[in-house]
């Protein structure tokens, strides 16, 4: 025989099946497995244990298989919510919102003096702006509250001409 | 659900061992005994239902087979022990997601092979052989008797020398080739099963096997010429 042929190689390698671990190894393997699992579990933080339990529960219920239905329902609800929001934000509503806005008038009220009765628009915007406001307080704008006119009618502070 | 929490009672544990070890290690013919798939399905199903003892039965059943697989890929007993513990731990954590598309046999072997290949990549070339003893039953092995009768190197070398040479030759193969050789020659798996476990085509398995055999022939040529070194 000149060299090992493929058959001989196979036979030689099959002899490796006779290499066996020490006696009692397989008998103790399960005990060792339990011990390691216990050690691993004890070393985990509590939240991870809860997470694992939750995952086990989810897998047992086969929730991933049913996940498509709630996902579809959620998608429909989100779409409905987006559409309804767009419908409610029509141009008329925008004008009404502008009409109800409080006029921006800078006064000398300090931040500390804020209350429910003093709106946000009365915030102190600084001494420079305050000076301008006191200058303009001699004009009719100080006495006349601003008026807003809906849609096409221009906003004006002038008194209407009467003949 | 955790096997560490639900330890089996001593009496049941003995039953487990006796039933599991019946299918253990001793080679019979060319192929190792194939486990019954329907029995595995039941055990998997019971494990998924929260019965930790069912997974214990799977551990006992598959430990000898997987030990052989991992040991012959690493040639180191301690590494094999650690890897095998990790393999079963991973299998236990993942068994909830096991949907039975392949058999449990294929699934657990895939985990074992992949984890071993990853380990071998990390280990690199820094390793030492830590070999198990050759069982005394080899003296009655038909193939061994045949080899010692016909092959002069095997006849002249003592058993430990033969074991060392074989393991060294195996370790010269690449990890992927060694995996195929282990599963085919030592574990007696058919090409189709190996291709499923490795997720490669049967052609790839045959090609790797052919190449590995050629390499082993070369590596063992020295042993053939000079059986006692």
Image (cartoon, grey):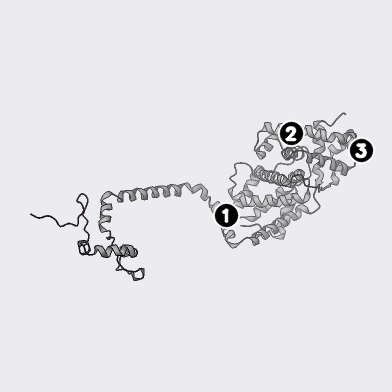
Residue assigned mark 3: B156
Residue A123 at what x, y percent from top left?
Answer: 33, 65
Specify whether disc 1 shares its chain with disc 2: no
Judge from the rendering whether residue B200 lies leftward or rightward of residue A140; answer left or right: right
Q: Is residue B212 magenta?
A: no
In the rendered image of this protein, does residue B80 appear above or below residue B180?
A: below
Q: Mark number for residue B209?
A: 2
Considering the image in quadrants, where does the N terminus of chain B appear? bottom right
Depth check, front residue: B123 or B201: B123
In the rendered image of this protein, does residue B118 appear above or below residue B224?
A: below
Q: Mark number for residue B120?
A: none
What's drawn in magenta, residue-wise? Answer: A148-163
In the rendered image of this protein, does residue B39 appear above or below residue A49?
A: above
Depth check, front residue: A153 or B139: A153
> Residues under labels 1 and 2: Cα distance?
40 Å
Specify whether disc 3 shares its chain with disc 2: yes
Front: mark 1 or 2 = 2
Residue at image coords 55%, 51%: A59
Q: Mark number for residue A56?
A: 1
Residue B134 at what x, y percent from top left?
Answer: 84, 46
Task: Identify the chain of the residue marked 2, using the numbered disc in the image.
Answer: B
Circle 1 SS class: helix
Q: Is residue A155 magenta?
A: yes
Task: Identify the chain of the residue marked 3, using the numbered disc in the image.
Answer: B
Tally of marks: 3
Task: Identify the chain of the residue marked 1, using the numbered disc in the image.
Answer: A
> Residues under labels 1 and 3: Cα distance?
57 Å
Q: Mark 3 or mark 2: name the one nearer the start of the chain.
A: 3
């Amino acid at each position: 025989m000149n060299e090992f042929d493929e058959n001989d190689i196979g036979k030689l390698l099959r002899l490796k099946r006779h290499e066996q671990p020490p006696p009692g190894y397989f008998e103790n393997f399960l005990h060792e497995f339990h011990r390691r699992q216990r050690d691993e579990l004890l070393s985990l933080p509590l939240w991870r244990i809860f997470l694992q339990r939750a995952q086990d529960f989810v897998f047992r219920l086969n929730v991933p298989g049913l996940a498509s239905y709630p996902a579809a329902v959620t998608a429909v609800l989100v779409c409905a919510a987006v559409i309804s929001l767009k419908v409610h934000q029509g141009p008329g509503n925008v004008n009404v919102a502008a009409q109800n806005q409080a006029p921006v008038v800078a006064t000398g009220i300090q931040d500390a003096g804020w209350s429910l009765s003093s709106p946000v628009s009365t915030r102190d915007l600084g001494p420079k702006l305050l000076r301008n406001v006191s200058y303009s307080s001699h004009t009719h704008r100080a006495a006349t509250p601003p008026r807003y006119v809906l849609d096409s009618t221009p906003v004006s502070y002038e008194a209407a001409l009467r003949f | 659900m955790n096997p560490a929490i639900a330890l089996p009672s001593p009496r049941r544990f003995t039953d487990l061992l006796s039933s599991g070890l019946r299918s253990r290690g001793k080679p019979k013919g060319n192929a190792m005994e194939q486990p019954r798939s329907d029995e595995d399905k039941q055990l998997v199903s019971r494990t998924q239902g929260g019965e930790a003892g069912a997974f214990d039965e799977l551990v006992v059943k598959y430990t000898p087979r997987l030990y052989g697989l991992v040991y012959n890929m690493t040639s180191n007993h301690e590494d094999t022990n650690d890897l095998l513990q990790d393999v079963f731990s991973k299998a236990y954590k993942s068994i909830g997601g096991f949907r039975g598309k392949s058999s449990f046999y294929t699934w657990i072997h895939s985990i074992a092979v992949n984890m071993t290949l990853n380990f071998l990549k990390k280990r690199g070339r820094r390793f030492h052989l830590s070999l198990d003893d050759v069982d005394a039953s080899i003296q009655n092995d038909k193939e061994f008797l045949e080899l010692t009768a016909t092959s002069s190197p095997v006849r002249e070398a003592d058993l430990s020398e033969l074991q060392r040479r074989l393991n060294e030759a195996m370790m010269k193969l690449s990890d992927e080739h060694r995996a195929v050789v282990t599963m085919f020659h030592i574990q007696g798996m058919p090409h189709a099963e190996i291709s499923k476990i490795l997720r490669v085509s049967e052609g790839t398995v045959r090609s790797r096997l052919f190449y590995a055999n050629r390499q082993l022939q070369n590596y063992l040529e020295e042993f053939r010429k000079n059986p006692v070194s």
